[in-house]
Image (spheres, coloured by chain):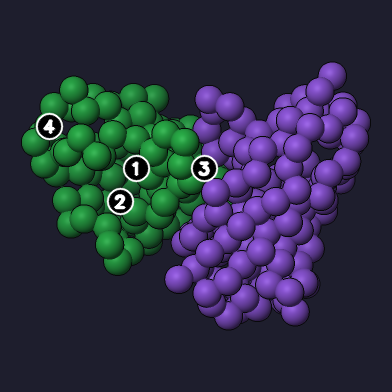
Chain colours: A purple, B green
Amino acid sequence: EVQLVESGGGLVQLGGSLKLSCVASGFTFGNYAFSWVRQAPGKGLEWVSSISGDGGRTFFADSVKGRFSVSRDNSKNTVFLEMHNLRVEDAAKYFCAKDSGLAGTDGHLSSWGQGTLVTVSS
Amino acid sequence: SYELTQPPSVSVSPGQTARITCSGDALPRQYAYWYQQRPGQAPVLVLYKDKERPSGVPERLSGSSSGTTATLTISGVQAEDEADYYCQSRDNNEDSVVFGGGTRLTVL
């Protein structure tokens, strides 16, 4: 059974930093790309970032480009999202999602974690 | 990146058919994917490649795509289908994932 468990969310001050983690199990981790998707309270889904299966390619939404980075440790079945210079509009629940493919540029998000909440105080 | 447009809400009575549309200029070239999100829960994939159902998804959920519009159809709607539904596609020009704004399905 595929399981994705996010952690690392919390309350951070405006301009601060936070690092989210997503630990995966139940499949061959390195064979799949991963994405981070966020959802502000009462709002829709917003794609944030994706990373290919080998970590060699990363992709970001314009709204976070230059402030967020994504990485993975295939030996620990973990994906990370490092967030810097956080803004009020970054406050959201952040979901980790397993991509259907390796590249991170096609396909769908086949499994999702339950999310971790990021709150930004001004 | 381009946009996907969904109606904010759709309401149907139990047993009726609900249709949720998703419009986007790239849909003639890109697949549409659909996710169901119940309140307080994570999204769940319910359709991929326009019309394919993952295992465990009821047959009453089906999908189609024509031109710039993809459609999620739920036949014989049940109370448990009440949820938010999001379409998703890809923008290969910018290597990004695109979501529609979501449609709240209300079962009257």
Is label 4 in a helix, a strand or a loop?
loop
**Quadrant of res A64:** top right
Q: Are marks 2 and 3 on the same chain?
A: yes
Expressed as whole percent of the image width and height from the top left, the position of residue A100 reads: 50, 68
Disc 3 crowd, CA 10 A, few/some/many (<14, 14-19, 20+): many
Q: Which residue is mark 1?
A: B69
Amino acid bearing label 2: Ser
Is label 3 in a helix, a strand or a loop?
strand
Measured in 3D between alpha carbons, the distance from the residue under mark 4 to the one under mark 2, in whole angstroms, is: 25 Å
Q: Are marks 1 and 4 on the same chain?
A: yes
| CB under 8 Å between discs 4 and 2 | no
As drawn, the label of residue B14 is 4
Expressed as whole percent of the image width and height from the top left, the position of residue A96 reads: 61, 54
Q: Are marks 4 and 2 on the same chain?
A: yes
As drawn, the label of residue B65 is 2
Q: Which residue is mark 3?
A: B99
Give the chain letter at badge 2: B
As drawn, the label of residue B60 is none
